[in-house]
Image (cartoon, grey):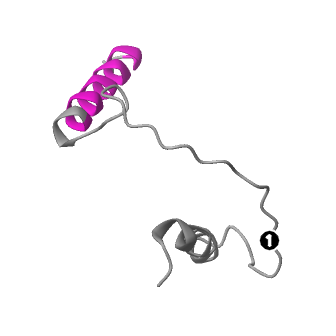
Amino acid sequence: MALPIEKAPKYFVRMLKDWKLVAGETLAVDSMKIRGQNSLKNDFNHKKIKRHLEYIDGRIAEATPKSQ
């Protein structure tokens, strides 16, 4: 059974093909190095994500000109 990280490239290519971003005939990927890190700052849960999305929406609303 393949580990989830081993399935990622295959899923990624399938997703790009579904979105018609690549034909899928030839694909070259540079190597990558993955290092796990799960500090409190890098740990996300639903509450943190919701709060951050609200912050982003607020910033967008501030930057968007008001219609008259």
- Judged from the image, the secondary structure of the residue bearing numbered disc 1 is loop
Point out residue 6 in the picture as x, y percentages from the top left corner: 56, 71
Point out residue 10 in the picture as x, y percentages from the top left corner: 60, 76
The answer to which of 25 and 61 lies nearer the viewer is 25
Residue sitting at 38 percent across and 37 percent down?
38
Point out residue 33 in the picture as x, y percentages from the top left corner: 67, 48
The answer to which of 31 and 36 lies nearer the viewer is 36
Specify the segment rendered in magenta.
49-65
Residue sitting at 48 percent across and 43 percent down?
36
The answer to which of 41 and 66 lies nearer the viewer is 41
Which amino acid lies under the numbered mark 1 shown in the image of this protein? Leu
Q: Is residue 24 above or below residue 43?
A: below
- How many other residues sit within 10 Å of disc 1, few (<14), some (14-19) or many (≥20)? few
Within the image, what quadrant is residue 67 found in? top left
The answer to which of 33 and 30 lies nearer the viewer is 33
Point out residue 46 in the picture as x, y percentages from the top left corner: 19, 43
Left or right: 43 in relation to 14: left
Which quadrant does the C terminus fall into? top left
Left or right: 7 in relation to 21: left
Within the image, what quadrant is residue 55 found in? top left
Prevailing secondary structure of the magenta residues: helix
Residue sitting at 68 percent across and 67 percent down?
21
> Can you identify the residue that label 1 sits on?
27
Left or right: 13 in relation to 51: right
